[in-house]
Image: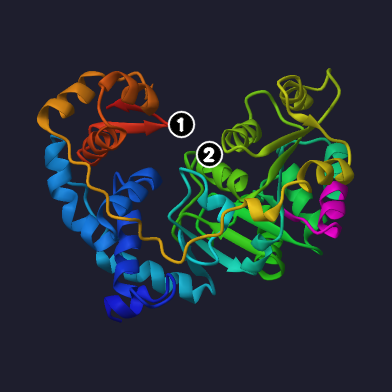
Amino acid sequence: MTDAAAAGAPGAAPGSATRFAALRLIRSARIGPVTFRQLIARYGDAVAAIEALPTLAARGGGRAPVLAEEAAIRREIASVRALGARYLMIGDADYPALLAEMETAPPAIIVRGDAALLARPCVAMVGARNASAAACRFARGLASDLGAAGFTIVSGLARGIDTAAHHGSIDHATVGVIASGIDVTFPPENTGLQEDVATRGLLIAEQPPGTQPLARHFPSRNRIIAGLALGTVVVEAAPKSGSLITARLAAEAGREVMAVPGSPIDPRAQGCNLLIREGATLVQSAADVAEMLRPIDPRAVRAPGGSYRGPPVAADAGEAERRAVTALLGPVPVAVDELIRQADCAPAVVQTVLLELELAGRLERHAGGRVGLI
């Protein structure tokens, strides 16, 4: 199979070679979602971006990232096809519009099932893996009621609340976002449920097929769950749980955060009660959730563009500007906005220097739009 033929799988032809290059860029070392989007904005497409990597990395004082092998990308595409799945790439007409609004939106996701479910208003439901029986029953009923009211339920196919949410919404509209490859089930006891979600709803994975669910993949999975939804409902959560990470990501994206209150003597309810104390909306029924989300006019959600190519951006940095920005960096993460204020350089120039340093392997991006030297 030729590169061009293989590239047709990630999306529509035209520009299949460009789409193949985009997937290769995504799978390469040191190319995260923010870096990918900046490269496309600067160079217009992935082919030109790949050609520019050595120069950018050299300016940052290092070597260019090791690109993913073309043969590995061809194998991945063939595997996705064989699994009955397909790619949605940012800028595709059917790439989720709300997810595309996030700065860290995945440049490509792999989906299996009915992607049209994402066109309905989506509600994320998350919570404790060791949830109480009462909380699971409540989550199942809430998901069923919301599904009957026209909402799509998004969750993570984990034990506890996630499982209950999918069971409650499977007869209406459910979307499962997993931290592994689309052919890997975790936890193992949800094998049947995951297959049901893929065949009766929609299954989404960011990682290539065959990828096992490593710890670092779960926060990435959580941002997709938050990004797909107009709002996130938390049902039972410990104070430092992944569910609260999802809630924080939803809040940072300007989405509604809702929580179901619980007993103050149950540790599994402390996270929800904390969210409510900090300003999350207290909800006790599907009507409460619908009341929060129905006023959001669908016309307020920007329609996705027809191409993932961005306008070419020229913002080369001179040596003096490069030194000024680098001098402000250290191992302690700092907000990019703060760098722009202190560097006395144009924002595009600061972003270019950060891009060069990251591609050189000298800079790491952290949550909340912060960066630090490695």
Q: Is residue 158 above or below residue 169?
A: above
The earlier-in-sequence mark between 1 and 2 is 2
Res 99 label: none
Residue 43 place in picture, x, y as percent: 25, 55
Question: Callout 1, which amino acid?
Answer: Ala
Q: Is residue 79 above or below residue 298?
A: below
CA gap between label 1 and label 2 equals 10 Å
Q: Are marks 1 and 2 in contact (CB under 8 Å)?
A: yes
Q: Is residue 330 above or below residue 39?
A: above
Q: Which residue is mark 2?
A: 219
Residue 237 place in picture, x, y as percent: 72, 30
The magenta segment is: 141-153
Name the mark nearer the viewer: 1 or 2. Answer: 1
Mark 2 Cα-neighbour bin, 10 Å: few <14, some 14–19, many ≥20:
some
Image-based side of 69 in relation to 81, left or right: left
Q: Tell me which corner region of the image, top left, top right, bottom left or bottom right, holds residue 307.
A: bottom left
Residue 46 place in picture, x, y as percent: 28, 60
Q: Which residue is mark 1?
A: 367
Q: Residue at 73% of width from left, 24% of height from top?
A: 279
Provide the secondary structure element on which disc 2 rests.
Answer: helix
Q: Tell me which corner region of the image, top left, top right, bottom left or bottom right, holds residue 265.
A: top right
Location of the N terminus by quadrant is bottom left
Viewer-proximal residue among 257 and 114: 257
Count of all numbered marks drawn on residues in the image: 2
Mark 1 Cα-neighbour bin, 10 Å: few <14, some 14–19, many ≥20:
few
Question: Callout 2, which amino acid?
Answer: Pro
Residue 251 place in picture, x, y as percent: 62, 33
